[in-house]
Amino acid sequence: MQTITRKSLLYKTNVEYGDYCINHVLGCSHGCLYPCYAYLLKKRTGSVKDYKEWTEPKIVGNAIELLKKEVKKHNNLKSKSVHLCFTTDPFMYKQPEIISLTEDILAYLIVYTDVQECTILTKGVYTITGLPIADHFKYGITLVSLNEDFRKKYEPGASPLKDRIEALYYMSRAGAKTWISIEPYPTPNIIEQDINEILDAVKFVNKIVFGRMNYNSLAAGYEEFYKEQAKKVSEFCLKNGIECYIKKGMV
């Protein structure tokens, strides 16, 4: 796998997933076609030239070196949370080099810093057996459908949905806090489905995040639909004692 060199790795963020974020890979072989915000961003800024280049990820070769330097600048991340990742996937499906680098980053954060929590969001599959790391994990998956044909069309390089859910359940049983991001949730003109079926499949999680589909003209004009879905998510979470976060613009 190709590598790139960066001048910085640890970034402050105001997003709900953490105080800081790490994006230690450029590109993503999942190749999501919603379209993908991260791809649009990187193409607009000139980081990648096209979809083909985007789906051929490159790892940050000096990631650990940067991390060791930067945690000191941020008070050793004392009582802070770190999210992996916003513009790529930390456990990219069938990408062992990326998974290995993610493990190294997590191991360093847990063992050598005062970080309070590491938040993960993936469309890949990952399970761990060491509870010391699991205790610091908030492990999440993106799941916007249970339809595997939809997954193959819109998330062609990502892991099968069943495998994704099974890994999430394993992490939950191992002691990790688990969560699910139902975003970007597709509108009925893209796929007809019942969101309650998705919710029932992950009712063991600690938190659910729900958000609409953006950057896709097919999802325009569905404000009432998203309000209805947001209400269903909120009511489900309230009934089952699950933390709920509805993205802005939904209600």
Image: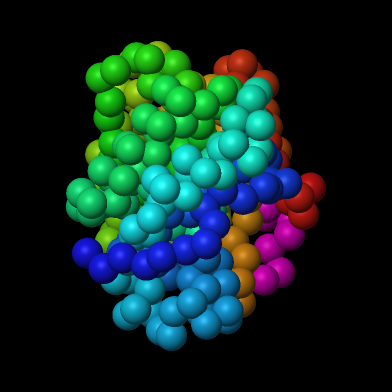
- Quarter of the image where one finds residue 110: top left
**What residue sits 56% from the left and 26% below the top?**
115
State whether residue 172 appears in this view: no
Q: Characterize the magenta stretch by its predominant secondary structure.
A: helix
- The reply to whether the magenta stretch includes residue 223 is yes
From this view, report whether residue 160 is shown above or below residue 19.
Answer: below
Q: Closer to the camera, 38 or 1?
A: 1
Q: How many numbered dots are placed on residues in this image?
A: 0
Instruction: Give left or right: position of 225 versus 155.
Output: right
From this view, report whether residue 171 is shown above or below residue 193.
Answer: above
Extreme residue in the bottom direction? 49
From this view, report whether residue 138 is shown above or below residue 149.
Answer: above
State whether residue 37 appears in this view: yes
Location of the N terminus (image quadrant): bottom left
Q: Which residues are magenta?
A: 220-229
In the image, residue 11 lies at what x, y percent? 61, 50
**What residue sits 65% from the left and 38% below the top?**
74
**What residue sits 38% from the left and 73% below the top?**
54
In the image, residue 222 lies at what x, y percent? 68, 63
In the image, residue 243 lies at what x, y percent? 64, 25
Q: Closer to the camera, 245 or 101?
A: 101
From this view, report whether residue 46 is shown above or below residue 91.
Answer: below
What colour scheme has been applied to the protein in the rendered image? Answer: rainbow
Q: Closer to the camera, 31 or 28?
A: 28
**What residue sits 48% from the left and 71% below the top?**
39
- The reply to whether the magenta stretch includes residue 98 is no
Q: Closer to the camera, 134 or 124?
A: 134
- Quarter of the image where one finds residue 231: top right
